[in-house]
Image (tube, coloured by chain):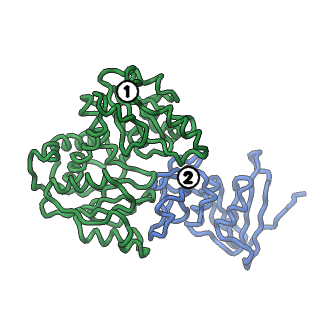
Amino acid sequence: MSGSLKGSDIVSIRDFSREQIEQILNVADKMVPVAKGEEKSTELEGRVLGSLFYEPSTRTRLSFEAAMTRLGGRTLGFDEPKGSSVAKGETLADTIRMVDAYSDVIVLRHPQEGAARLAGHFAEKPVINAGDGAGQHPTQTLLDLFTIRNEKGGIDGNHVVIVGDLKYGRTVHSLSEALSMFGAKLTFVAPPTLQMPKEHIKHIESKGLKPKISNSLDEVIGDADVLYVTRIQKERFPDPAEYRKVAGAFTINRTMLREAKKDMIVMHPLPRMNEINPDVDGTDHARYFVQAFNGVPVRMALLSMVLGGME
Amino acid sequence: MKEFKVTPIRNGTVIDHIDVGMSLKVLRIIGVRGDVNSTVSVLIHVPSKKGAWKDIVKIEDRELDPKELDKVALISPDATINIIRDYNVAEKFVVEVPERVKGIMRCSNPSCITNKNEPVEPEFAVETKKPLALRCTYCDRLTTDIAENIV
């Protein structure tokens, strides 16, 4: 993918160069006052977003709707396939062709990997991937990068410690690959059974980086600039006692943060379960709610760029 | 005295230099089953001139089409194809792994959208040729277990 994003599909973070990502983050910066409601915009007035959520989502769906609304556009679609023609067995390809005719841009969340790429083949309008199964979730990656850049003044050179379920967590795969593009120092902290897959580590090493692998948060927290926490899912463990032990070892609390640098930030894609104790919320480290808000300006930037409003 | 384990064929295809042990998979992927009307000979574990071992398949009265040749290339990239017409080798070439593989393999990822009931042909980009690894254009999954996924 090169040059203007007008008319482009946003499927995988791997499709983007560093320059393109920076361009999106720059546009997102300009969107912040509108996202906060401090300024008004009619940039996408009369434009329609087709929003197809085959799986439940709170943040992603609402922030896309907020983004479209803040720019003066409208949203149509469904937030669960029940009651739609999908429930009658319609193929994704047919649903996409129909929505393509009703809207100017399509946002898709789907349980099957590769669904967004398939949608892109059948739609003439741009398709934005809002998560395809265990596959890609590029808008989450972009808002994570946006958060790190804004909160730390840049991405390069920061030591990002990513903790939690690194094997199955889709956000951490795209995020770590994108961070490697920016030259961030990476450490992966997880129980051995949930460590980062070799394929992703190889991809990161191909960028000239050597990520550190650890299973102890205490060992690395003092050196972190960003602590990115993800959920460890109970269903990954056949033994509930084992789950409690592992989950307990990777829970962030205020006491643990005494070892951290003063300006270290804690991020989480949310929803959280127990992995960040609520006593962290009031500290200067917590950034996960700012991060959730950042979904709006970043998605505004993407909608605006693929529809050709902004370069 | 020269010993012929299998006699020459008049018309058809000889697939030589098949990776040893892969000949039965070659037969399966090119659709040779019990209901053939011409003779099919299979030689397993034959010494090759290079001092190694190979398999050979001879199919009488049939020439493989390009899609079938691509399939053979995927599971035995060093195989050579000899097209025989009237006892003479009319054409001889080494199979070639295509740059993109379309419509002859399914994705090994059961959660890939191409394994659902969608009107698309699975498509792959060749990531590495030796060992052969194919990346799904849709779900990005790398497939190395090629023979099991050929359709």
The residue that appears at 56% across and 48% down in the rendered structure is B129
Distance (Cα) linking label 2 and label 1: 44 Å
Amino acid carrying mark 2 in the image: Thr
The chain painted blue is B
Colour assignment, chain A: green
Q: Quadrant of residue B29?
A: bottom right
- State the residue position of label 1: A254
- Residue B136 in the image, given as x and y percentages of width and height: 48, 55
Other residues around mark 1 within 10 Å, as few (<14) / some (14–19) / many (≥20): some
Q: Residue furthest right?
A: B1
- State the residue position of label 2: B143
Other residues around mark 2 within 10 Å, as few (<14) / some (14–19) / many (≥20): some
Q: Kindly indicate whether the residues beneath marks 2 and 1 are on one polypeptide chain.
A: no
Nearer to the camera, B6 or B117: B117
Numbered disc 1: secondary structure: loop
Amino acid carrying mark 1 in the image: Arg
